[in-house]
Image: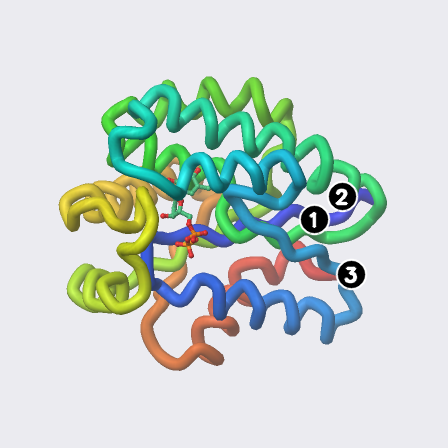
Amino acid sequence: MRGKFITLEGGEGVGKSTQVRALAGALRDRGIDVLVTREPGGSEGAEKIRELLLAGSEERWGPRAEALLFAAARADHVEKTIRPALEGGHWVLNDRFVDSSLAYQGGAGGLGIETVREINAFGIAGCYPDRTLVLTATEGSERARARDSGGSDRIGGRPDDYHRKVDAAFRIIAAEEPERVRLIDASGSPEEVTQRLLDAIADLLP
Ligand code: TYD
């Protein structure tokens, strides 16, 4: 039987990495065999593209080339890592996936959510998540944490206005696809947040 494909999303500094680890642990405690992976990256080729995307100056890539590089990395990740794992019956928990491209390159980067959806549809070739969990924090706390945590790579270091647009785009995407995409309140203790994530995938659990 095919495994379930879960993706975790969110802006900068919402505690996503901590929650990926915690959710993977909670799934394993339930006897689920879960592969944890991340984007950009998650396969040999995609990790190479990650270096191209995140290092260097803002001017290194224009918006279209940047969106295509994310989509190319994702296509390789799907082909080499995600699809084989799902077909082998494993669950896949991905730290970021297509919705990051929709929010960052589409919503904040100015290409438009629909355009970025189209170029990614080609790369993903039908491999959509069973559920996408978007961690959301109140704007003030989110930016404060982002200042502490990020700011060092090409994209994390973009101005506050860019990151506000990312957050707004995630909310639009969740409203467009309410069955797949769920907004999860990232406030409170890490344990509380993990429980909210588990509640949002309760219908998928064995
Ligand atoms: P990473 O160090 O993995 O950050 P995080 O802990 O926030 O996930 O860096 C990934 C950066 O790339 C992050 O700023 C989000 C951005 N990104 C996009 O702009 N588009 C995408 O499609 C993906 C997957 C990530």
The residue sitting at 66% across, 34% down in the picture is: 78
Q: Which mark is residue 4?
A: 1
As displayed, is residue 31 above or below residue 4?
below
- Asked if disc 2 is less than 8 Å from ligand 1, the answer is no
Q: Nearer the viewer, residue 129 or 78?
A: 78
| Residue 87 position within the rendered picture, expressed as x and y whole percent measured from the top left | 81, 40
The amino acid type, in three-letter code, at marker 2 is Leu
Q: Disc 3 marks which residue?
A: 33
Could you tell me if the residues under marks 2 and 1 are in contact, i.e. CB atoms within 8 Å?
yes
As displayed, is residue 197 above or below residue 172?
below
The residue sitting at 49% across, 70% down in the picture is: 18
Q: Disc 2 marks which residue?
A: 86
Q: Nearer the viewer, residue 175 or 185?
A: 185
What colouring does the structure picture have? rainbow
As displayed, is residue 24 above or below residue 170?
below
The residue sitting at 26% across, 68% down in the picture is: 148
Report crowding for label 3: few under 14, some 14 to 19, many 20 or more residues within 10 A (C-alpha): some
Alpha carbon of mark 1 to alpha carbon of mark 3: how far?
A: 10 Å
The amino acid type, in three-letter code, at marker 1 is Lys
